[in-house]
Amino acid sequence: MSTFQIDFSTVQKRRIIGIDLGTTNSLAAFMDLTGPEIIPGADGSRMVPSIVSLADDGTFVVGEAARRLLIDAPQRTVYSVKRLMGRGREDVAEELRLFPFRIAEGSEQVIRLALGERLFTPPEISAQILKELKRRAEQYLGEEITQAVITVPAYFNDAQRQATRDAGRIAGLEVLRLVNEPTAASLAYGLDKRKEGIVAVYDLGGGTFDISILRLHEGIFEVLATNGDTHLGGDDIDNRLLAIALEDMASEWGEDLSHNGEAVQTVRQAVIRAKEELSFQPATVIDIDYRGRRYQRELKRELFENLIRDIVDRTLGPCRQAMRDAGLEPEQIDEVVLVGGSTRIPMVRRAVEALFKAKPHSELNPDEVVALGAAVQAAILSGDVQDKLLLDVTPLSLGIETMGGVVSKLIHRNSTIPASATEVFTTSVDGQRNVLIHVVQGERELAKDCRSLARFDLKDIEPMPAGMARIEVRFLIDANGILNVTARDLRSGKEQSIEVKPSYGLTEEQVEAMIRESYEKAEEDLIERQVREARVEADNILAAVEKARMSDAWLDLTDEERAAVDAALNELQVVYHASDHHLIRAAIEKLDAATRRLAENMMNTAVRQALKGTRIE
Amino acid sequence: MAHLHDCWHCGAKDAASLFCRYCNTIQAPTPDYFEFFDMPRRLAVNAEDLKGRFYTLSRLLHPDRYTRRSEQERRFSLEASSILNDAYRVLKDPIQRAEYVLRQEGFTVGDQRNKDVPPELLEEVFELNMALDELRGGDLEVLPQLEVMRRDFLEMLAAIDRELEAMFARHDAAPPESRKQVLGEIRSALNRRRYISNLVQEVDKQLTARNA
């Protein structure tokens, strides 16, 4: 046991971080003593662009470094993968027209994306972003991170939530809670203001739109209603500008570039820049330099607003529906909070203000507020924050398909979660052994118009005459908004076995295979982590010795002892950057041994000081 | 009122309802909504009191409070929170609350008898169907008449709600043996109410289809 090192591991609880896994950018945050803080990267950056690229050597490049690869290696690079989470191929036909996703054949149930020669599911790609955030957090906080709260759009359905949780597991994170993004944002806002009242959170991000209406009461954040569109966001604005610019360039240059991945990404980045500038100035220039050719086009805010008006208008319907569901008029909303980068657009702010008849809040950085809220929720789960509680709702009604394809609703939308419903099923034919239950999510009357969640097969039913079996099935939506189903045979009282066949997304076996695969890769990660941990330890002892050298105790040492300490100190500094943690550890041990007398001297000095302080004159 | 059982955790006898009174550990929750809220089985409920109990119990039972507890406690917390939320949803709404009590007392409640027109409404329903047919046929002159009928139905609903309120009070004050009879009356009123409210929905659907 080293003298200068203090072992915190037994005292410290495992830290839970908060993660905003966004369409465009992702962030991690943690709860500091003074409140939630964003975890920066080594370069000081606060956001990780949600871009993933597969390098030639099979490793992944994530974030800012991958942005450049959108242009240099478009076949191996992907962005906005959140749009594909928990979806099947037919759901994303619209996306495929607008985004350069390369989707493999046979992606009906789980989409597989091609990066170079290899195929990946959206959760696997999201997992790379999560791993990058995990790495940042471990580096910054100097400890291993294994638990997280991850945010999702409030309007995400069951499959999209499961896909997000799968991504966390593949990244080596235990996802303790999925929190809805607008609700997380309200937690971050609620920190400084102990307010009572009704709050609307308008969250327009890169690819998703949510509106949530909450009642705040003595630290309880109770969601009254939520609504949204999981395919509406800043991306849609970018695509609109992109199409116009490409068309304009085609007529100016006489060349259609819309199938040239490199050119499209160059133009895309230019129109995004122009869009962002228009939030702060009345006019800008779309300026593109592509392979020595120049394209310039002035864009006035007025024209920009005309181009995007219908996109902004699409957010208003869900807002009105949420107010109706909450039983509230706009006048009853006390505060409106803006979340998501797209709410920087002045036209969006005007639309929100006109609808809710209240000036919206935007004190907190709309890009960061969700991650900060996730960190608050993490602190609620760890018990560090006890005066707050989030009561969220399920965004979509849950039902089962009955005769004629009609949906029988079991749990209505905007029900506070956890929520449950119980139904008793029976057989319709003598000796029937199985009952198949088709569970759907959505508001429409026919199952075919709702979102298919899964088919639950009640198996091995005792053979008996038709209508005699009585199987009680309990549907429970947990605090993550994810469905759990259990069944009991009422006649025997025994648990009834169920086989779950998810309509979209990965089966449990597939997720486990992916986790195993990532463990195999984890060996490299483990080595890297050991080196990092050794360096953290080295930092501690170096700092402690540095401080001791300033003290009287240092002067009490013999010249030889001082020389030995200096030599050991020097050795540790030399091996500090080595990639073998054994070398660093050995140097730490050596320095620790060389400084033993110094430590004793310091201790004695401290004791003498203490005694002096208590002497009675 | 809350019924006591032995604590699964410390074994104390008759010590526990939602929590053990000795070791304070969460217990397997009762599925009975009134017992859960520790409220008497009455049809009249004070909304503010119910809300206060809901918030207090939420703070104690929510899964967020049990992340770092044992598997068993986490399971009880999830189970208890779901019952709490379901119970609050039902008890805060007078209609759902009455239906819950009716079901508990062995009455069948639901849509089965919906097709039978209550005899006192025969005339109104006949007129309404005529008007709706004409509207579907493209005759917009019936619109004012439909608006009037819609308002009449809404007034009937309000009247039924007042009747129900009085019946609730009568039920709560009645000795246990004569409660069943009041519940029977309540069920008839609820059936009538459901029938009329479906009519209003039908009119609304036709009117919005016309406006769209």
Image (tube, coloured by chain):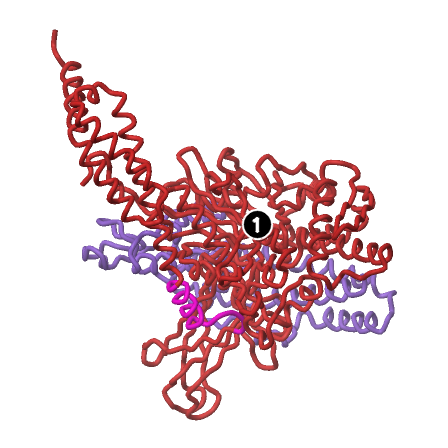
Chain colours: A red, B purple
Looking at the rendered structure, the secondary structure element under dot 1 is: strand
Residue in the foreground of this view, choosing between A379 and A608: A608
Q: Is residue A476 left or right of residue B203?
A: left
Task: Look at the picture and state if A610 lies above or below A208.
Answer: above
Q: Is residue B71 left or right of residue A562?
A: right
Q: In which quarter of the view is residue A282 placed?
A: top right
Residue in the foreground of this view, choosing between B151 and A86: A86
Q: The numbered mark 1 sits on a residue in which chain?
A: A
> What residue is drawn where x is 70% and y is 48%?
A272
Measured as percent of width and height from the top left, residue A497 is found at: 37, 78
Mark 1 residue type: Pro
Number of numbered discs: 1
> What residue is drawn where x is 18% and y is 41%?
A1
Q: Quick check: is A516 in the magenta stretch?
A: yes
> What residue is drawn where x is 56% and y is 64%?
A397
Q: Which residues are magenta?
A: A503-520
Task: Look at the picture and state if A278 lies above or below A88.
Answer: above
Task: Look at the picture and state if A416 lies above or below A617.
Answer: below
Q: Quick check: is B159 in the magenta stretch?
A: no
Q: Which residue is mark 1?
A: A49
Q: Residues within 10 Å of mark 1 (few under 14, many from 20)?
A: many
Q: In which quarter of the view is residue A612 placed?
A: top left
Measured as percent of width and height from the top left, residue A8 is found at: 26, 40
Measured as percent of width and height from the top left, residue B88 is found at: 47, 55
Residue in the foreground of this view, choosing between A357 and B194: A357
Residue A580 seen by the camera = yes
* Magenta span dominant secondary structure: helix
Measured as percent of width and height from the top left, residue A112 is found at: 56, 70
